[in-house]
């Protein structure tokens, strides 16, 4: 009995060490999984964006598992040869796997370098000398900061006020509203008009990317997020057609151009921008290059630049588009079933692909797209950007490696940081 009691503590210690060993092996094993998303043939194994996200955790899991396993082996195995072998294996695995995680940190740097080259091509090699941090407000000094990844964006909520659900247009039983993010101070401030996504039919003005609106309001921009006629918007009685959607966006420009409204929201009408994602990216691009061709835009709202996040630029040649869906959704009438070319006037690429067309009212654009986007093919943006460059529109195109649709959804991650870094510089260059 005495021998059994004497051995109990030793047995408990070994069980505890074995559990720790399994845990640390698991840490190393966890590292291998997300790496398949970076190096495997399927970027959606974790999902393009989440592969990079998982790797940000794995880069700590690999050394932690390696070090922990080396320590446990020292105490668990009495035979030095066994312990030494396990320690060497753990050390080698930690070094190799940690090294393989480094692309997570290299990708933002590479994208930042590519963005800098794009800015130089569009704005000249001295473009960096013409952008500067504001005297008051946030400013990202680099395309990506590991500190921001863990602490969040430098947004000061006290530097702006939110004004929600303000009506600007009434059609029948439908009231169209906007949210405004207004900087504290006398102004006037430059303005950004945000157009939400959702396939032209879904979501609403407050569905996503609230951090973008708050960031730029904190940086001294009045930001408006508007409704335009998607059936998914609050209290909407029907889906509006593509023509009506563009007319409704134009109506917001009329509302904003009213001197009393511009004064109330402290807007400098000479310095305005439009920004949108997905379907909103398409609408932003269409406003940027064809607003006077498709609908009535109030010229008092002087647009200096447009931002397009992975928007459809060529509706007729979008591989996920069908004439039947465009008709059944309510975006187009019966004519689209027999003549697909009726969508061309709503395709931004139409206004830049024909040499000799008038681009005097078109504005420079900042275009984002992920190369693993399964919703809108990245070639939509690539082709559009190539034509814009050929026509001298001074567009800046930024492509996110392994980025999927809505790659900038998480405000702390590389996609969001790179986007904000690029946007704040683009806006300044357009105003400068």
Image: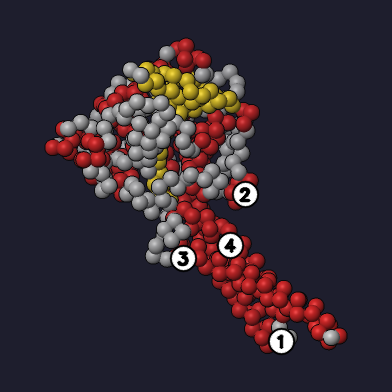
Q: Position of residue 194 (x, y in %)?
A: 43, 31
Q: Nearer the viewer, residue 297 or 320?
A: 320
Extreme residue toward the right, this view: 2
Labels 4 and 1: the sequence-earlier one: 4
Q: Nearer the viewer, residue 140 or 379?
A: 379
Question: What's the CA distance linking mark 4 and mark 2?
Answer: 14 Å
Give the answer, above or below, for where 69 lies relative to 152: below
Q: Please say if the residues under marks 2 and 1 sit with CB atoms less than 8 Å apart.
A: no
Q: Position of residue 359 (x, y in %)?
A: 28, 30
Q: Which residue is mark 3?
A: 36
Name the residue at 55% across, 25% down: 162
Q: Secondary structure at mark 3?
A: helix
Give the answer, above or below, for where 405 lies relative to 69: above
Q: Secondary structure at mark 4?
A: helix
Question: What's the CA distance linking mark 2 and mark 1?
Answer: 40 Å
Label 2 crowding class (10 Å Cα cut-off): few <14, some 14-19, many 20+? few
Left or right placement of residue 282 versus residue 323 in this view: right
Labels 4 and 2: the sequence-earlier one: 4
Labels 4 and 3: the sequence-earlier one: 3
Name the residue at 58% across, 58% down: 57
Q: Secondary structure at mark 2?
A: helix
Note whether residue 84 is visible: yes
Labels 1 and 3: the sequence-earlier one: 3
Q: Which residue is mark 4?
A: 59
Left or right placement of residue 221 versus residue 362 in this view: right
Question: What's the CA distance linking mark 4 and mark 3?
Answer: 14 Å
Q: Quadrant location of residue 62?
A: bottom right
Q: Which residue is mark 2?
A: 150
Q: Which residue is mark 1?
A: 80
């Amino acid at each position: 009995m005495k021998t059994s009691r004497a051995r109990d503590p030793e047995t408990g210690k070994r069980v505890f060490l074995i559990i720790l060993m399994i845990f640390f092996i698991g840490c190393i094993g966890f590292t291998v999984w997300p790496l398949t998303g970076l190096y495997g043939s399927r970027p959606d194994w974790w999902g393009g964006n989440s592969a990079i996200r998982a790797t940000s955790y794995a880069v700590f899991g690999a050394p932690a598992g390696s070090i922990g396993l080396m320590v446990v082996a020292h105490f668990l195995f009495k035979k030095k040869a066994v312990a030494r072998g396990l320690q060497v294996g753990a050390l080698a695995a930690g070094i190799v796997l940690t090294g393989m995680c480094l692309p997570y940190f290299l990708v933002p740097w590479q994208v930042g370098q590519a963005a800098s080259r794009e800015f130089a091509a569009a704005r000249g090699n001295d473009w960096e000398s013409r952008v500067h941090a504001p005297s008051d407000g946030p400013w990202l000094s680099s395309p990506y900061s590991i500190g921001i990844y863990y602490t969040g964006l430098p947004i000061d909520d006290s530097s702006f006020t939110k004004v929600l659900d303000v009506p600007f247009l009434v059609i029948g039983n439908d009231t169209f509203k906007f949210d405004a993010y207004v900087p504290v101070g006398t102004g006037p401030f430059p303005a950004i008009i945000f157009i939400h996504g959702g396939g032209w039919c879904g979501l609403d003005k407050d569905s996503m990317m609230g951090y973008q609106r708050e960031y730029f309001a904190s940086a001294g921009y009045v930001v408006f997020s508007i409704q335009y006629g998607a059936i998914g918007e609050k209290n909407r009685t029907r889906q509006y057609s593509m023509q009506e959607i563009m007319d409704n966006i134009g109506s917001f420009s009329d509302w904003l151009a009213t001197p009393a409204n511009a004064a109330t929201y402290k807007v400098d009408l000479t310095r305005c921008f439009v920004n949108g994602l997905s379907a909103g990216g398409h609408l932003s691009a269409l406003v940027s290059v064809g607003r006077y061709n498709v609908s009535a835009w109030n010229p008092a709202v002087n647009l200096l630049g447009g931002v397009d996040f992975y928007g459809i630029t060529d509706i007729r040649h979008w591989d996920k588009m069908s004439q039947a869906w465009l008709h059944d959704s309510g975006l187009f009438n019966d004519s689209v079933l027999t003549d697909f070319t009726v969508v061309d006037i709503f395709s931004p690429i139409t206004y830049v692909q024909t040499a000799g067309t008038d681009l005097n009212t078109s504005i420079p654009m900042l275009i984002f797209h992920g190369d693993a986007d399964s919703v809108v093919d990245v070639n939509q943006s690539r082709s559009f950007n190539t034509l814009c460059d050929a026509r001298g529109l001074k567009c800046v195109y930024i492509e996110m490696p392994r980025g999927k649709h809505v790659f900038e959804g998480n405000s702390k991650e590389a996609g969001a940081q790179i986007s904000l870094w690029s946007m704040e510089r683009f806006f300044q260059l357009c105003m400068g």
